[in-house]
Image (tube, rainbow, N blue to C red):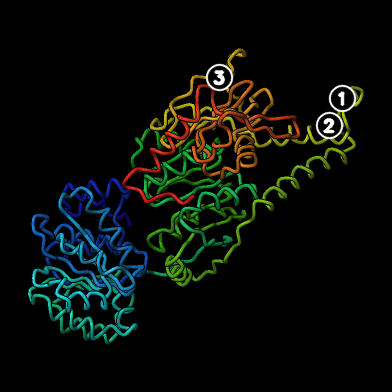
């Protein structure tokens, strides 16, 4: 069954704009069921699991029913923990981003009273808090509930389990009797039914009935990783296992674009699909992916419908889906026709509870995986290369040309050095991905509707005399550096990333756009890593000889430090940790 668009739920243009900015394309089942009655002012009892999108399910109506011109507290959201209160507050800020005058403040124990006093005194429409701290502010007279229009009890079952029943009763009795009352809970116990009976008026029950689905025989793994480390985790897994064809699912259009750009910048052939792309272009991308003309498709659920690829090796839940049914649909795209399929899911924090629900829902086991280390990834690459060499040495039908080796030996080169150099060239060739150069040469905002082919495709030649191409201005906080290896040395973007990581200790995921010229390569890197390059280049010995990394000609210490200082002193950001 198709999920409704947010446009069909009767929302204001400001909230629709915020939803679009977040990249959400469709309402989740709990959102589609709960938002309409809540907008009408009805009391609601919503039964849904953690991570089903319930924060937006009550957050959107709460924002819509608030008057930004009034500075009194109009919505109170009670949460069992400070972590959930913070999470809900962040979501409220995002959803109210285009409604001038709207303010939401979290209040919870363990945080400074003075800061909370200051925020409440300025005037706020929405308060998100834990019962204990809300009671403290009520007793101090710093939180008045006489203007409350809506009270939301988020994860009511957990609050009762934690012993907050008396506090909840006291808080509800202090609010106006004509208020709207909303309960959200994974389970509805007798205690909750009693609470609903005393403090709500003819509530509308919203329960998302989940039917159990069976999952095909797919190898399912999950990896615990912080949100910021997801990209690095993905790159390690792909490098270690050598996956060649996969779909990576994200929940928002914005995340799809960011991840696709990152993969392309790291040297993979990738493309994207989401509802913000024209249908004609989406059709072209789908057709190319079905023909395996690029390696990884980054997509949202709505855009990936109808994709049927027999040889798909991998499905990645970069973002955990909002409901278990979407999880089944996602991973069911691999392991078809009796072939091996792998499903990988990244989770962090509270998402583990949601993953456990998905296991129960699908009646399948999702095994916990351990990410390979950087050393293990390099060792795996070496093993693959050695297997290829052994295959040539053991195949009597293959007669490797020895004249090149003989000539190098005659010139006085050591046999070990010759072998290492040839292996380096072979590794560069096998990992070369011409797509990165072609697509990175486009402006950031431009989306190519043609995904280049796989790694065997040649790079469009530059003029031989070209040494330093016309480089676009570096992004904020970034700076161009020059590496003294180019296409003539048959290096790939990934080789350049590895050199920067080894030579300047720059994390691979921090390297930006890479542009390969004939004799040199150019990369955007964070200015924080470039202090050692001011005034002198960095040199390093490699299997192909000495490599030099330097600032692009014309950049001075003042340029680098000025860029870094401007970024580090922006008032909206916290000071960077050195």
Q: Nearer the viewer, residue 381 or 526?
A: 526
Say which element carries label 1. Answer: helix
Viewer-nearest of labels 2 and 3?
3
The tag earlier along the polypeptide, 2 or 3, is 2
Whole-angstrom CA distance, mark 3 to mark 1, is 31 Å
Report the residue marked by disc 3. Answer: 468
Q: Quick one: 314 or 100, which is closer to the camera?
A: 100
* Structural distance between the alpha carbons of marks 2 and 3: 30 Å
**Which residue is label 1 attached to?**
408
Residue 193: % across, % down: 23, 83
Q: Position of residue 403 (x, y in %)?
A: 89, 23
In this rendering, does residue 291 appear at all? Answer: no
The image shows a total of numbered marks equal to 3
Chain-order first, disc 1 or disc 2? 1
The crowding category of the residue bearing disc 1, from other C-alpha atoms within 10 Å (few below 14, some 14 to 19, many at least 20), is few
Q: Looking at the rendering, which quadrant does residue 173 occupy? A: bottom left
């Amino acid at each position: 069954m198709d999920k409704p668009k947010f446009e069909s739920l009767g929302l204001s243009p400001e909230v629709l704009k915020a939803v679009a900015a977040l990249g959400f394309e469709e309402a989740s089942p709990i959102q589609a069921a709960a938002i309409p009655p809540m907008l009408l002012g009805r009391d609601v009892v919503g039964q849904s699991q953690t991570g089903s999108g319930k924060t937006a399910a009550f957050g959107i109506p709460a924002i819509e029913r608030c008057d930004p011109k009034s500075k009194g507290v109009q919505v109170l959201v009670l949460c069992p923990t400070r972590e959930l209160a913070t999470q809900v507050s962040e979501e409220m800020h995002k959803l109210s981003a285009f409604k001038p005058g709207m303010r939401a403040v979290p209040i919870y124990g363990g945080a400074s009273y003075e800061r909370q006093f200051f925020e409440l005194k300025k005037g706020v429409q929405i308060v998100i808090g834990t019962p204990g701290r809300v009671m403290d502010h009520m007793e101090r007279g710093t939180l008045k509930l006489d203007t409350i229009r809506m009270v939301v009890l988020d994860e009511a079952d957990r609050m009762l389990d934690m012993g907050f029943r008396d506090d909840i009763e006291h808080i509800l009795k202090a609010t106006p009797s004509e208020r709207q009352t909303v309960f959200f809970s994974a389970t509805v116990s007798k205690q909750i039914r009693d609470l609903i009976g005393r403090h709500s008026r003819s509530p509308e029950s919203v329960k998302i009935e989940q039917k159990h689905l069976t999952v095909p025989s797919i190898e399912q793994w999950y990896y615990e990783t912080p949100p910021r480390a997801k990209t690095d985790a993905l790159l390690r897994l792909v490098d270690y296992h050598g996956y060649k064809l996969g779909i990576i699912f994200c929940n928002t259009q914005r995340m799809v674009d960011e991840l696709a750009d990152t993969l392309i910048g790291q040297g993979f052939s990738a493309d994207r699909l989401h509802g913000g792309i024209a249908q004609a272009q989406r059709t072209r991308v789908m057709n190319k992916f079905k023909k395996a003309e690029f390696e990884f498709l980054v997509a949202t659920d709505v855009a990936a419908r109808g994709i049927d690829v027999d040889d798909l090796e991998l499905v990645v839940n970069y973002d955990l889906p909002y409901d278990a049914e979407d999880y089944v649909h996602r991973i069911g795209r691999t392991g078809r026709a009796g072939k091996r399929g792998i499903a990988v899911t990244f989770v962090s924090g509270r998402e583990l509870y949601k993953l456990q629900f998905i296991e129960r829902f699908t009646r399948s086991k999702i095994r916990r995986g351990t990410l390979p280390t950087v050393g293990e990834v390099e060792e795996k690459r070496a093993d693959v290369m050695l297997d290829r060499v052994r295959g040539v040495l053991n195949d009597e039908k293959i007669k490797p040309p020895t004249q090149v080796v003989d000539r190098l030996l005659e010139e006085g080169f050591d046999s070990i050095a010759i072998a290492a150099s040839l292996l380096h060239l072979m590794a560069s060739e096998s990992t070369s991905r011409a797509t990165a150069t072609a697509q990175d040469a486009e402006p950031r905002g431009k989306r190519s509707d043609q995904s280049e082919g796989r790694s065997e495709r040649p790079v469009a030649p530059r003029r031989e005399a070209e040494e330093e191409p016309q480089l676009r201005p570096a992004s904020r906080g970034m700076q161009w550096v020059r590496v003294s290896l180019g296409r003539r040395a048959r290096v790939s973007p990934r080789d350049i990333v590895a050199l920067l990581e080894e030579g300047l200790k720059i994390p691979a995921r921090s390297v930006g756009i890479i542009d390969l010229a004939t004799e040199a390569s150019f990369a955007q890197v964070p200015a924080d890593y470039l202090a050692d390059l001011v005034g002198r280049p960095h040199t390093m010995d490699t299997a192909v000889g000495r490599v030099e990394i330097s600032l692009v000609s014309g950049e001075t210490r003042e340029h680098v430090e000025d860029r870094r200082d401007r970024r580090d002193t922006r008032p909206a950001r916290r000071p960077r940790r050195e």
